[in-house]
């Protein structure tokens, strides 16, 4: 059922910009069109690009927003999960709780 | 003889119906919502669109380019891997989840409080391994606070005895305790790094259940302005188990999705999840049309994102452990297209 919804109506999660749009909904309570436009403006892309895995692969690579490893494609020298969230917080201009906690606990804040 | 079109009933069973029968069910589903909730019926162009979806011979359907919505998964994972953090990674990497949710097998804030330190450690570990936003979720689950499972007198036993005042007092006592447990979990999860809290199936035990949820939501919003709060409803109608409880002067009992949205928004939630239960003996077309008519006023008025519940037995998705993709994809597309949802 989860995969069915993902294919039928989902933005695509981390393969696209679904997680970024979701953050604007969760954190700022933005409705979908507003959240999509906000993220597109911050990424410098079109709203249509946000759900396009090909476009977003390159955008996420360039901005260090994290990518999913696929079979023999790994990204060991690129941002991992927490590192990517540092970049997401900066690009979207929102605080991310786990990033703020990480900074405090690591003595970076 | 009219062509028979494969479709489903609310229990998931495969049936064949004529186009005219499906069309009649769409009208009947919409009218059922009008009759009960006093909402406007679906417009003719909306019924026509639903008819196209439910009479298509395709086994799978989807929204158009650009109409994709945010998918949040209440209770991400199936507990089949016996590794809660890995379950979150699976939903992120393999199910296209836009949001994920860590949860405990005993999906109740009361139960979670007894294993809170372990749950917070899992959440912290999950945050180190995932990128998509991560909620912690459970049910307010007010019934757990009634005897013999909890401390408050059992209002379901008191009411048949005519002890209405005592039943109401018991629910008020339980709501205070539920609110305290939800707050305790929220404080710990925010300290561990959660992106948000999900109060799932709010109102399952009636209006006192919802009131406790709204009260703790307001407290969360006042304390942490950037933490997400999602309130997902248990059903389309708030049961008046108490009957007199109010939030900001509005009576909670008997609220349909629009009234629920207003209360949830006033409390400070950032995502509202309406739920419309499936009638297992009616067709998927009937159920989806009814769900659309009930929730259409919500998305028309909402100022916060609306993520409709569309799991087994709600939102037109059949009540079966393995909802067929033909049925689920149709419900998914229909809800998004008609309601202009922000997510599912």
Image: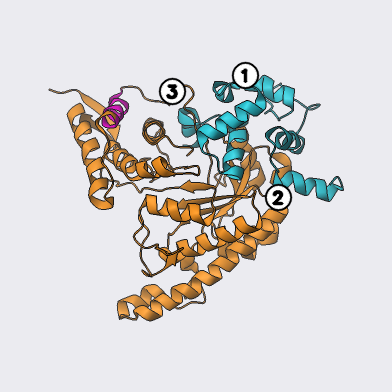
Chain colours: A cyan, B orange
Packing grade of label 3 (10 A; few <14, some 14-19, many >=20) is few
Q: In the figure, residue B117 lies in which quadrant?
A: bottom right
Q: Which mark is residue B64?
A: 3
Label 3: element kind:
loop
Chain of the residue that carries numbered disc 1 in the rendered image: A
| Main SS, magenta residues | helix
Q: In the figure, residue B188 lies in which quadrant?
A: bottom right
Question: Residue sitting at 51 percent across and 60 percent down?
Answer: B213
Alpha carbon distance from label 2 to label 3 = 36 Å
Packing grade of label 2 (10 A; few <14, some 14-19, many >=20) is many
Question: Residue sitting at 27 percent across and 26 percent down?
Answer: B55
In the displayed structure, does residue B31 sit left or right of residue A74?
left
In the displayed structure, does residue B35 sit left or right of residue A31?
left
Chain of the residue that carries numbered disc 3 in the rendered image: B
Question: Residue sitting at 37 percent across and 31 percent down?
Answer: B330
The reply to whether the C-beta atoms of the residues labelled 1 and 3 are less than 8 Å apart is no
**What residue is shown with label 2?**
B193
Report whether residue B81 is seen: no
């Amino acid at each position: 059922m989860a995969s069915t919804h993902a294919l039928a109506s989902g933005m695509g999660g981390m393969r696209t910009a679904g997680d970024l749009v979701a953050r604007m909904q969760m954190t700022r309570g933005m409705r979908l069109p507003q959240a999509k436009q906000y993220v597109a403006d911050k990424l410098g892309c079109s709203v249509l690009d946000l759900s396009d895995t090909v476009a977003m692969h390159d955008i996420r690579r360039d901005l260090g927003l994290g990518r999913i490893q696929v079979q023999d494609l790994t990204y060991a020298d690129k941002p991992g999960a927490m590192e990517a969230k540092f970049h997401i917080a900066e690009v979207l201009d929102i605080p991310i709780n786990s990033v703020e906690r990480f900074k405090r606990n690591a003595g970076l804040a | 003889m009219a062509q028979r079109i494969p479709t489903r009933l609310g229990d998931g069973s495969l049936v064949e119906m004529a186009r005219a029968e499906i069309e009649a069910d769409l009208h009947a589903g919409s009218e059922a919502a009008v009759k009960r909730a006093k909402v406007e019926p679906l417009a003719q162009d909306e019924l026509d669109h639903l008819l196209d979806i439910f009479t298509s011979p395709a086994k799978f359907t989807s929204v158009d380019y650009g109409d994709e919505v945010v998918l949040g998964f209440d209770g991400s994972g199936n507990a089949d891997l016996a590794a809660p953090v890995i379950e979150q990674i699976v939903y992120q990497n393999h199910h296209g989840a836009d949001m994920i949710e860590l949860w405990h097998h005993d999906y109740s804030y009361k139960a979670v409080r007894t294993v809170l330190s372990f749950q917070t450690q899992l959440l912290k570990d999950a945050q180190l391994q995932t990128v998509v936003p991560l909620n912690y979720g459970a049910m307010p689950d007010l019934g757990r606070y009634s005897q013999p499972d909890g401390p408050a007198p059992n209002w379901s036993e008191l009411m048949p005895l005519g002890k209405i005042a005592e039943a109401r007092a018991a629910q008020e006592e339980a709501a205070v305790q539920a609110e305290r447990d939800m707050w305790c979990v929220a404080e710990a999860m925010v300290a561990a790094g959660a992106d948000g809290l999900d109060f799932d199936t709010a109102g399952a035990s009636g209006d006192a259940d919802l009131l406790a949820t709204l009260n703790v939501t307001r407290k969360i919003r006042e304390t942490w302005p950037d933490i997400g709060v999602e309130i997902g409803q248990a059903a389309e109608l708030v049961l008046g188990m108490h009957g007199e409880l109010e939030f900001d002067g509005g009576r909670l009992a008997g609220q349909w999705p629009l009234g629920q949205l207003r209360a949830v928004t006033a409390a400070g939630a950032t995502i509202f999840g309406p739920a419309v239960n499936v009638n297992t003996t009616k067709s998927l077309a009937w159920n989806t049309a009814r769900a659309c008519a009930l929730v259409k006023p919500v998305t028309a008025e909402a100022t916060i994102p609306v993520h409709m519940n569309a799991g087994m037995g709600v939102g037109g998705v059949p009540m079966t452990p393995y909802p067929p993709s033909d049925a689920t994809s149709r419900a998914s597309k229909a809800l998004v297209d008609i309601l202009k949802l922000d997510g599912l």
